[in-house]
Image (tube, grey):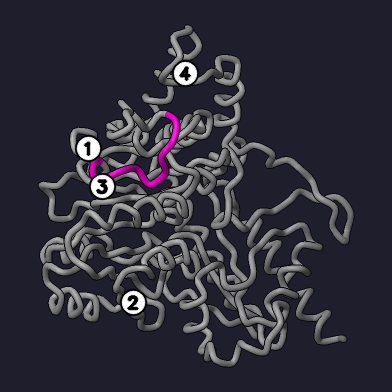
Amino acid sequence: MLNLSKLVYGIEKKVMTKNGLHQYINLDNAASTPPFISVMKRIIEESAWYSSIHRGTGYKSQYMTEQYEHARQVIANFVNADLDEDVVIFTKNSTDSLNKLSYYLEYLPGELVIYTRLEHHSNELPWQKYKNHCVGVKDGVLDIGELETVLKANRGKVKLVAITGASNVTGYIPPIYTIAELAHEYGAKIAVDGAQLIPHKPFNKSNSNDPKNIDFLIFSGHKIYAPFGAGVLIGPRQVFTQGPPSQPGGGTVKGLTPETIIWMDPPDKEEAGSPNVLGALAIAEACETINSIGWKELVDHETSLINYAYEKISQIPGIILYSKSRTNQVGVISFNIQDIPHNKIAQALAEYGIGVRSGCFCARRLVLELMKVDIKTLGGLDKENLPGMVRISFGCYNKKSDIDLLCKALLEIINSTIKH
């Protein structure tokens, strides 16, 4: 089985557990991945040349400007974006990218934004200021029939179809390229929140001549082994030339008089102030590292982990699994154990040196629906008693032995709870 642990920084670190010092097992990669060693090495090397970019004339400024701009090309190549049409804008993270995109929807025709029950709050809340429709799910799978019905009924009136590339609750991958064809057929554009997809599967953004073209793509560095506070928004250059920038400031202006402002062209127009140069280089380096490993190896490895995890976890007494698909998902599995609160399970696992996530994962609509919880019943509950799930999520470096240790710990937690 593929072993990529030597590519990951900090993998050897031990943490204090109930049984003394043990190597940390991170099964919370859907929240943030650890950095690649190659990323850390690149950041250390480039820090010696760090300088202000774009407007500096010194050697270091010129060098860093060249590296920063080259990072855009690397990232575009990674997702097959066409820089003759598209622009790669560096942001803080996916949330920042989606809010920037919501600003530019003012310049798109139509009035309705469609999103889905699968979405992280970052791909739901920005659309609330528009007329909007939330497409439902059936057993955690997107209702494509409802989506097409809404598109057909609002032909030419839909600004955007906003869809996750992969659910951060179940790992389910909706058919984004089919959805892109549907959106374009009815005159809408599509935005894919790729935060959970880009680290796990190859992506083809394509160009506007392809009906399967993804108009806007969003993802974060901290979920792709590049944790330095940077994200990416990729979309048609023409869209971002319209109107003033979402955040005006240094570097966004070509000319300024008391009567007139001439804005810079994108991407500069959308990168106000001193940009996060090292964060951009980190994402590019992570993309190149993934390419060097090979997508087939990565996908095959994760598929093996997913199948093994289902096999082992499903044997645990009282387990409730919320991830329904094994063949069309990334490495995210959410569950509960009967009669043990989700937060208690997560806290207990931490005592074994195992990191997981519990709660609603900023996807309350989907979590509560899968758990069949009426939102009206939540008003009188304090934070500690809110319903939620336990989530495990794999990085490329996780191994089957991590799953074995997880299952062993869960069985001990169950037995301990029964005794008490």
Residue drawn at the location 71% of the way across and 69% of the way down? 346
Separation of marks 1 and 4 at Cα, in angstroms: 23 Å
Q: x, y (%) of residue 213?
A: 19, 51
Neighbor class of circle 1 (other Cα within 10 Å; few <14, some 14-19, many 20+) is some
Comparing 150 with 311, the one in front is: 150
Q: Position of residue 282 (x, y in %)?
A: 51, 33
- Tell me the distance, in whole angstroms, between the alpha carbons under discs 2 and 4: 43 Å
Pick whichever, 40 or 111, lies toward us: 111
Question: 10 Å neighbourhood of mark 2: few (<14), some, or many (≥20)?
Answer: some
Judging from the image, what secondary structure is the residue with disc 3 in?
loop
Residue position marked by numbered label 1 in the rendering: 82
The span from disc 3 to disc 1 (Cα, nearest Å) is 8 Å
| Residue at far front of view | 258
Reading the image, the residue beneath label 2 is 134
For marks 3 and 4, the one nearer the N-term is 4
> Is residue 254 in sight in this rendering?
no
Q: Are marks 2 and 1 in contact (CB under 8 Å)?
A: no
Secondary structure at numbered mark 1: loop
Q: Mark 4 points at which residue?
A: 64
Circles 1 and 4, Cβ within 8 Å, touching? The answer is no
Q: Which residue is drawn at 57% across and 56% down?
A: 31
* Eye-nearest disc, 3 or 2: 2
Q: How far apart are marks 3 and 2 (CA)?
A: 24 Å
Label 4 sits on what residue type? Answer: Met
Of marks 1 and 4, which one's residue comes earlier in the chain?
Answer: 4
How far apart are the alpha carbons under marks 2 and 1? 30 Å
Residue labelled with disc 3:
205
Report x, y in % for residue 145. Answer: 21, 80
- Give the residue displayed 69% in from the left and 39% down from the top: 10
Q: Give the range drawn in magenta.
A: 241-250
